[in-house]
Image: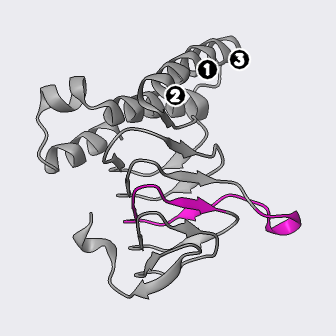
Amino acid sequence: MIRSDYRKYKRYGGNFIGIVFLTQAFWAIIQFRVASFVYNEVKIFGVRHLLLGICLIWQKLIEVTTGISLPASVIIGRSFYIGHFGNIFIHPNCCIGNNCNISQGVTIGISGRGVERGVPTLGDNVYVGCNSTIVGKIVIGDNCVIGANSLVNRSVLENQTVLGVPAQVVSSKNSSEYI
């Protein structure tokens, strides 16, 4: 998974030194991938808890350094890209598909009441613009674009571009030009 994330950063014009040593968002992704592996794959009782403790400390250091919160329990597909670091918070129960791009200032979290309370699920090839908020038990379809500064609290069908507070469909252009 780290390899697919690295290839995506490289596709956007980075080089090895710049991506690995100078790109804070990539640091957060590496930390997330390692912690996610421990969370999902390590089953040995004592070892699991020790490694999860180390990963939690590492996650908090990354959060303080980069402003990016990617808990180990989040499900994120291949080729994940964070364009800029800073103020990105993703709820631990969220699910994000393959080949998604997230910009700075994004919150993906919990909202709603009763049976409608929950967290979003993002499909494949979703682009989330800067300072957007996606909340509630909703589904963002494949190939969607969430415009900058949008509040998305209702599900979005595939191949739609939404914008505004609350977000409304403004176009049926998909995310192919953004990702």
How many C-alpha atoms fall within 10 Å of the one at disc 3: few (<14), some, or many (≥20)?
few
Give the residue displayed 32% in from the left and 43% down from the top: 84
Q: Secondary structure at mark 3?
A: helix
How many C-alpha atoms fall within 10 Å of the one at disc 1: few (<14), some, or many (≥20)?
many
Give the residue displayed 37% in from the left and 38% down from the top: 85
The residue sitting at the right extreme is 114
Amino acid under label 3? Answer: Phe
| Residue assigned mark 2 | 35
- Left of 68 or right of it: where is 110? right
The correct choice, above or below, for 48 with respect to 173 in the image is above
Mark toward the start of the polypeptide (1 vs 2)? 2
Q: 54 and 27: which one is in front?
A: 27
| Residue assigned mark 3 | 45
| Residue assigned mark 1 | 52
Q: Secondary structure at mark 2?
A: helix
Mark toward the start of the polypeptide (2 vs 3)? 2
Amino acid under label 2? Answer: Ala
Give the residue displayed 50% in from the left and 74% down from the top: 164
Say whether marks 1 and 2 touch (CB < 8 Å): yes
Task: Assess whether residue 33 is covered by the magenta stretch.
Answer: no
- Position of the N terminus, as image quadrant, is top left
Give the residue displayed 37% in from the left and 50% down from the top: 78
How many C-alpha atoms fall within 10 Å of the one at disc 2: few (<14), some, or many (≥20)?
many
Q: CA distance from mark 3 to mark 1?
A: 11 Å
Q: 4 and 43: which one is in front?
A: 4
- Left of 170 or right of it: where is 135? right
